[in-house]
Amino acid sequence: MSIASVKNLTVQYGPFTALDDFSCEIPEGCTGLLGPNGAGKTTLLKTLLGFVNPKSGSATVLDRDIRTQGKQIRQLIGLMPEQDCHIPGMTAVGFVAYAGELAGMPAPQALRRAHEVLEYCGLGEARYRNVETYSTGMKQRIKLAQALVHGPKLLLLDEPTNGLDPRGREEMLTLIRSVSHGRGVNVIVSSHVLPDIERVCDRVVVVMKGKLRMAGTIRDLKAIEGQPADVELREASPEFVRYLEQEGLLVTPTRPNTYRISTDRSPEAMTQMVFRAAQATHAQVRGFQIAERTLEEIFMEAIETA
Amino acid sequence: MIVMDSVSRWYGQVIGVNDVSYQIGPGVTALLGMNGAGKSTLMRLITGQVRPTTGSITVFGEEPFANPGVFERVGYCPEIDNFYEYMSGREFVYTMARMNGMNDATAKARAGEMMERVNMGHALDRKIAGYSKGMRQRVKLAQAMVHNPDVILLDEPLNGLDPVGRREFMGYLGEFSAQGKTIIVSSHILFEVEQMTRSIMLLNRGRLLAAGDVRTIREYLDRYPHRIRIETPQPRELASRLIALPYVLKVDLDEWSQAIELQTRELNQFYEVLPQLVLNENIPIRGVTSPDNNLESIFKYLIEA
Amino acid sequence: MSTVPNGGPIADLSYRGYDGPLESPRMRWWVIARQGIQLALKRKGLWAVMIGSAWYYLVMLIVLFFVQQVLSANPMGEAPMAAFMKRLVWKDQFLHGFSYAQLPLLAVTIMLGSGAIANDNRSKALMVYLSKPADKTDYLLGKWIGIALPIWLTLLVPTVMFYGYGALTFRQYGFISDDPWLFPKLMAVLPLAALMHSSLMLGVSSLFDQGRVAGATYAGIYFLTNFFTVLMGAAWNSSRGEAPAFVKTLYYGSLDGLLIGSFKAIMGTSGTPPFGIQAPRAIAIEPPPIVLVLGIVLGLCVISLGLAWRKIRAVEVVGG
């Protein structure tokens, strides 16, 4: 089942075309939204929220038309905005409960649910304090909580780890991952921090110059044909390379002390070859894994073929 | 170039940095720490915006506080995003250049040059109010470098940049580093910091927790033995073999992911034995990785301690 | 036998969705209004000012009580009492009640509304509102009602209570018969004050980032225009009614003046001295033309709300 379906959508702001005949399907699960600044990513998010008036084309989010059912869409979506935002003069509980009421929950339900969601987001006693006294990490959690309070089917996260230190980043990513896997909540993460996307998402959509550049599961996109292996030695060893090449394997140096090795023989045979070579040439293998493209490589490639 | 000798700075009762001693030389040094650890205070001490409460800090042998001689040789790219919005990018960098003591002609030329350098040639004369986040970051970098300083401090410089911009920025820093400049970068995105440098300074609650080469620091953390993850379709067999080795301290069996994770302090010995396991004992292996040999793990270990 | 839901002894407290009841989106503005009112009513100072705005009615009640109980009990007091009652124009009591409530009403408005949009500007609250199924009209309407409703009630409650007291006690003195349309006209004019103050305050609030500055600006407008009309009033009085007509109209050229002028115009009175005292040398200033004053009030409301709307319209929820 598709969460969002965009068909030939064109969105213009005056003379500027933000989305140009854009089509994509976003399935269930956790999807990362990537793209250079000004590429149309922001416009796509606004579209998914039901805020734009497209020039042509159509789009549905959770089976609701974006042109006519914007409010209904926002009923089913939770947005965690990038910028710092809160309602002045409220405690965390009050704020999240208010957000729930704005989403249509009756007041007692909203308060009960606010407590539940704040607990889940890791805010203990601090929830009774004024939001204005909060640190960056806590503010991000509140933004997540107010997005979750009305139990949305789709969660839109815009730069969720902005300003968080390494521990806060880890905790936020764990939180996102646990909500998106196995809880029936679909997630779209828009971020420039590619390691975060890799950690949390199963799929990516790359947008550039208003068009869809690439879409697919991260696993598929990362796979390299022929399944070469990246081997890291303790020290560079030309003898090691020679040994393998004599056996008919292709060896390419990549990073210092690291080689990419490919062959059309089976992976098991390759593994045996590599360790035999290491033993024979007294090289020490410190790392061995199936080579994958990094998300960054995938991204760069996607936007370069423009 | 930058020498810190038991330098401390506090604000009322709140500690900024507490008794930090270290020397920073040319190349890229990463300044790391949780929010509130003292990174910004340290930057302010180096750029001479505040004076140490106790101890001393010298840049090029002089005290940086209110010292134009030092200011001319130090560039600062802060985290906050405050500009004169009505100015164009070029005007802003020009103004900053003039404030650094350049005369009119040099400032104009350098401003234009720097903006080109950071790929802002196409938007030179547009008002800053109309710039995107990434463009604002680049203007900040341009003004930090316009007077060709020997020391550049950057506070979260990659914030708001898209992956292309990040790559480019890290490229600029590499260039400056190659020119012999001292670059201090503060960032929370450890994955990227790792790609920029191996030299770090870790602050925690104002104190200097660790400083130096990442690899060396890892060696010293022997409370945390090295972890090695091996993927294999026969995890149990491999585990039973490994447990027999005297220097293997612990083996975690993860049948579901078809992997084992072992801990050892004797990396060399283990890696020497690994080919034997693969070839003689005939245990198929799909991957060998060191999960905690990265900056993020080291950071976690140090902070937790 | 007690049982734990989902079967086992240990409850599953991980995240779950919300399947409960939901309200219709049509009343979303009321949630916003209620929030604003609740937040404001927490301040004790606001209650004090709201009650204090009815001070004229309180004083009049004491005066009337005195006149009734003391004067009428004394046979010598019959005549002064009758004269007093004859002098008293009931609708003018409401005029005075209304007029003397203007300054406290300014305080109520500022307390309720100076930060209404200003604080939200600073904390970017609108992004939260807009990401929910609440749109910009809900927001503006909610904020507006959150200010207008309390202002209206501040005026309404004392007026109705005084009217009730008067209708019950002074019927024989012509309370009802003097002006049978008094009550409906009052009901028509009181909301005007709520309307104007609420709209203007919102408009001013939307221009700033800080509630305090917005409040100070609004107070500034009030007092400056007030000062101007005091001058006009002095000019009129000193010329003993000979000055040109526009001076008389300009006398109503301030925030409270517009409201008082509307009141006079709708009620059809030029005012008599307050508290039933005698002041033969005072010159009553007629109300301005009703169309003019109502037109200006409504015009100001539209302009202010337009300003607020313009500010709100520019907010984008995603990206910057």
Image: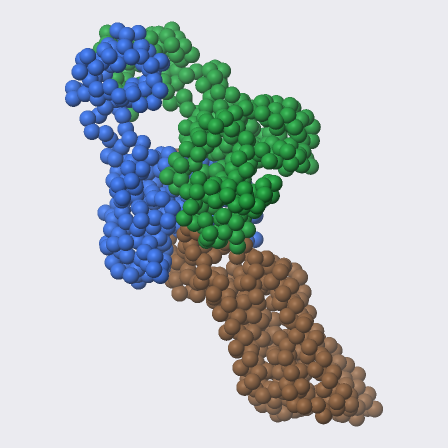
Chain colours: A blue, B green, C brown
In this view, the residue farthest toward the left is A265
Give how far across and how far down residue B185 sits, in percent. Answer: 50, 32
Residue closest to the eye, C156 or A207: A207
Give how far across and how far down residue B130 sits, in percent. Answer: 46, 53
In this view, the residue farthest toward the front is B105
Residue closest to the eye, B225 or B22: B22
Residue closest to the eye, B193 or B138: B138
Seen at 20% across and 17% down, the residue is A249
Give how far across and how far down residue A297 sits, in percent. Answer: 31, 34
Q: Is residue B28 left or right of B275 when viewed as pictured?
A: right
Residue B136 in sight: yes
Quarter holding residue C189: bottom right
Seen at 65% across and 71% down, the residue is C222
Quarter holding residue B190: top left
Q: Is residue C50 left or right of B77 when viewed as pictured?
A: right
Answer above or below: position of B1 versus A59: above
User: What is the total number of numbered labels drawn onto the structure image?
Assistant: 0
Residue B19 in sight: no
Seen at 53% across and 35% down, the residue is B148
Quarter holding residue A193: top left
